[in-house]
Image (cartoon, helix red, strand yellow):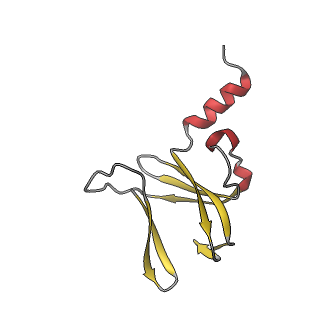
Amino acid sequence: MISNSAWEKVKRSVNSFRSGTAVPFSDEVHINDQSVKPGWYGFFTIPGREKWTLILNENYDQHLAEEYDPAEDLLRLETTPITLEDTVQRLTYYIKNIGEAEGILSMS
């Protein structure tokens, strides 16, 4: 038999993160017109067939759904995934510069 607290963790994990990492910003950045101060943040993804949710969380030192608190989300973005021509073996993050102070985050 599963306890209520264990069941809550399972339910939270089912539609939850598939990747998570800590990301540092040495300077203030703007993401979708929202200012993000320098510091470390948790970055998580929730994938789906039609859309992905990207989350920047104020708590970078956590173990995914077990310690995750949505009240600490700094921002959430929805994006449409595209299919890559070539398979990649590891998750990679890449920021492509598109201007002096602008970039596009790519994940593969």
In the rendered image, the vertical position of residue 56 relative to residue 96, given as above or below = above
Does residue 33 appear anywhere in the picture? no
In this view of the protein, which residue sits in the foreground, 93 or 12? Answer: 93
Q: Quadrant of residue 3?
A: top right
Image point 63% across, 36% down: which residue? 12
User: Is 93 above or below relative to 25?
Assistant: above
Quadrant in the picture for the C terminus: bottom left
> Which quarter of the rendering shows the N terminus?
top right
Residue at far top of view: 1
**Relative to residue 82, is residue 11 drawn left or right?**
right
Residue drawn at the location 62% of the way across and 32% of the way down: 11
The residue drawn where x is 32% and y is 52% is 88
Residue 15 image point, x, y percent: 55, 39
**Residue occupying image coordinates x 67% and y 18%:** 2
- Which residue lies most toward the left here? 85
Looking at the image, which is closer to me, 106 or 92?
92
Horizontal relation, residue 96 to residue 34: left or right: left
Q: Is residue 99 left or right of residue 74?
A: left
